């Protein structure tokens, strides 16, 4: 198997960014609200991450959870977030806007890409909600994006291997296909070898117990639709990441 794969870590906090760097990640994608699929991180998180990281820092630009059909107001919000990311010195943004018919929204994406300037652009897993992955691939290449983050239109990347392989073949050297979702030390080598990808996206998190001593068991800060353990944090684990990278880079 070839060496020197580039590993991107889906970082849910500045703490995860730091662990990702310690563990040998090439790049992080900083997100908030991971249980909801990821939304734009705060200005503070972006700024502190930029101060502390020497590796590449991308941030997701997504104003809310749910679908990828955005209003004019949400588009304005995304443009402001991109402006903030540029000011901070972020390396890249991660975006994805779709039409009601499930196609790539060329106009909205193009406006976001123009606002990004010299920052790299990744088209995120909105791609997995596209009606036609092969037609959408061509449109994203036309937009000038650097890569597509995708699970192969399946819940997990391992399940999406057949489509991922076809996308890599169709893309050639025109754009990077980067698998993500459910990639662990148990399947990373299989996904890399069977798809032919050169970049992979994973989290490598471990649970860190809260130091709170008093805990009120009757109250939860979250809603009923998303259940999380409020007395632990899932943080990228540098040692787990180092082990995973070793499995494909030797």
Image: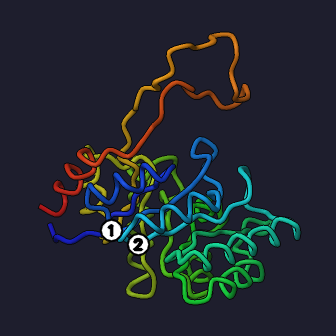
Name the colour scheme.
Answer: rainbow
**Measuring 60% from the left and 52% from the top, which residue is drawn there?**
38
Label 1: few (<14), some or many (≥20) within 10 Å? some
Percent x, y for residue 239? 23, 46
Q: Secondary structure at mark 1?
A: loop
Q: Is residue 4 shown left or right of residue 59?
A: left
Toward the viewer: 73 or 101?
A: 73
Vertical relation: 45 (above or below) 169: above
Q: Is residue 123 shown left or right of residue 105?
A: left
Which residue corresponds to mark 1?
26
> Residue 106: which numbered mark, if any?
none
Label 2: few (<14), some or many (≥20) within 10 Å? some
Toward the viewer: 188 or 56?
A: 56
Instruction: Count the numbered circles shown.
Output: 2
The N terminus sits in image quarter: bottom left
Vertical relation: 23 (above or below) 116: above
Q: Secondary structure at mark 2?
A: strand
The alpha-carbon separation of the residues under discs 1 and 2 comes to 7 Å
> Residue 56: which numbered mark, if any?
2
Vertical relation: 138 (above or below) 167: below
The C terminus sits in image quarter: bottom left
Percent x, y for residue 164? 42, 64
| Residue 105, picture quadrant | bottom right
Percent x, y for residue 84? 67, 73
Q: Earlier in the sequence, mark 1 or mark 2?
A: 1
Spot the residue most to the right.
Answer: 72
Q: Is residue 138 shown left or right of residue 196?
A: right
Percent x, y for residue 3? 17, 70
The reply to whether callout 1 and callout 2 are in contact (CB within 8 Å) is yes
**Measuring 38% from the left and 50% from the top, which residue is drawn there?**
158
**Measuring 88% from the left and 67% from the top, which residue is drawn there?**
73
């Amino acid at each position: 198997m070839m060496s020197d794969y580039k590993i991107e870590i889906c970082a849910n906090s500045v703490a995860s960014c730091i662990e990702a760097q310690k563990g040998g990640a090439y790049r992080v994608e900083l997100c908030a609200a991971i249980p909801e699929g990821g939304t734009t991180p705060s200005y503070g998180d972006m700024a502190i991450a930029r101060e502390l990281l020497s590796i590449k820092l991308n941030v997701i630009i997504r104003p809310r959870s749910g679908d990828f059909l955005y209003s004019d107001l949400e588009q304005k919000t995304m443009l402001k977030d991109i402006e903030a990311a540029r000011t901070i010195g972020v390396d890249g943004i991660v975006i994805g806007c779709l039409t009601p018919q499930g196609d790539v929204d060329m106009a909205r994406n193009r406006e976001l890409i123009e606002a990004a300037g010299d920052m790299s652009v990744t088209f995120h897993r909105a791609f997995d909600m596209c009606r036609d992955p092969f037609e959408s691939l061509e449109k994203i290449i036309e937009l000038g994006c650097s890569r597509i983050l995708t699970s192969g239109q399946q819940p997990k990347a391992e399940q999406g291997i057949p489509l991922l392989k076809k996308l890599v073949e169709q893309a050639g050297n025109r754009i990077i296909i980067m698998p993500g979702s459910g990639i662990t030390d148990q399947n990373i080598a299989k996904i890399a070898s069977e798809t032919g990808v050169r970049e992979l996206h994973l989290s490598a998190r471990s649970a860190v117990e809260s130091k709170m001593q008093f805990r009120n068991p009757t109250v939860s800060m979250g809603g009923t639709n998303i259940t999380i353990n409020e007395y632990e944090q899932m943080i990228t684990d540098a040692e787990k990441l180092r082990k995973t990278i070793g499995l494909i880079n030797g």
